[in-house]
Image: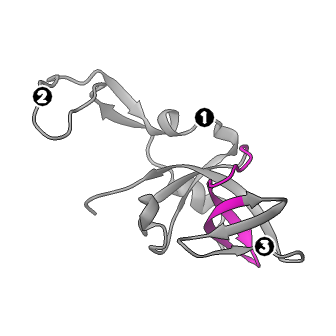
Amino acid sequence: MFLLQELEDACPSPLTPYLGAYVHAGFPSPAKDYEDKKLDLNEYLVKNPISTFFIKIDGNSFLWAGLHSGDLLVVDRSLDAKNNNIVLAYLNGRFTVKRVAFIKSKVFVSSGEKSSEILEGEDFLIWGVVIGCVHKFLI
């Protein structure tokens, strides 16, 4: 299990240089030679600061969604999960990342192609909705 302090320590430093422009993928385009402003990743990624936190994902079962082991997930506890959202769930005593589906008052979770129904009596709670991810290409 993780501690709240570990989550706070995982948050990125607030101000990073930001060019303020889009870059075209494929072939070079004219770019600005100066920095417009500082990019605050918390401002960019977090809409509800009081209810949002960062947590690292461990494992590769969400590669299909672009989530790699070691990525920082941005999780918002104030949002209600909707069909096919990726969520941080508490399932049978452990935190886990799952895709959630709601079908006729039943809840199904999956981490890939195979899904399973949450049965009555199982210890299950949606802890928050994953709203973003910070992924490093080079470590």
Please give the residue where the numbered disc 3 appears in the rendered image: 118
- How far apart marks 3 and 2 lie (CA) works out to 50 Å
Q: Which residue is drawn at 74% across and 46% down?
A: 80
Q: In this view, does 80 lie above or below 61?
A: above
Indicate which disc residue 28 carries: none
Residue 131: percent from the left, percent from the top? 56, 47
Q: Nearer the viewer, residue 125 or 38?
A: 125
Q: Nearer the viewer, mark 1 or mark 2?
A: 2
Q: Is residue 98 magenta?
A: yes
Q: Of the residues under marks 3 and 2, which one precedes in the sequence?
A: 2
Amino acid tagged 3: Ile
Residue 52: tell me if it is visible.
yes
Amino acid tagged 1: Lys
Q: Is residue 99 above or below residue 78?
A: below
- How far apart marks 1 and 2 lie (CA) works out to 31 Å
Q: Which residue is drawn at 11% across and 24% down?
A: 30
Residue 71: tell me if it is visible.
no
Q: In this view, does 71 lie above or below 16?
A: below
The image quadrant that residue 24 belongs to is top left
Please give the residue where the numbered disc 2 appears in the rendered image: 29
Q: Of the residues under marks 1 and 2, which one precedes in the sequence?
A: 2
Name of the residue lying farthest toward the front? 104
Amino acid tagged 2: Ser
- How far apart marks 3 and 1 lie (CA) works out to 30 Å
Side of 11 relative to 36 (left or right): right
The image quadrant that residue 79 belongs to is top right
Identify the magenta region.
78-101
Indicate which disc residue 47 carries: 1
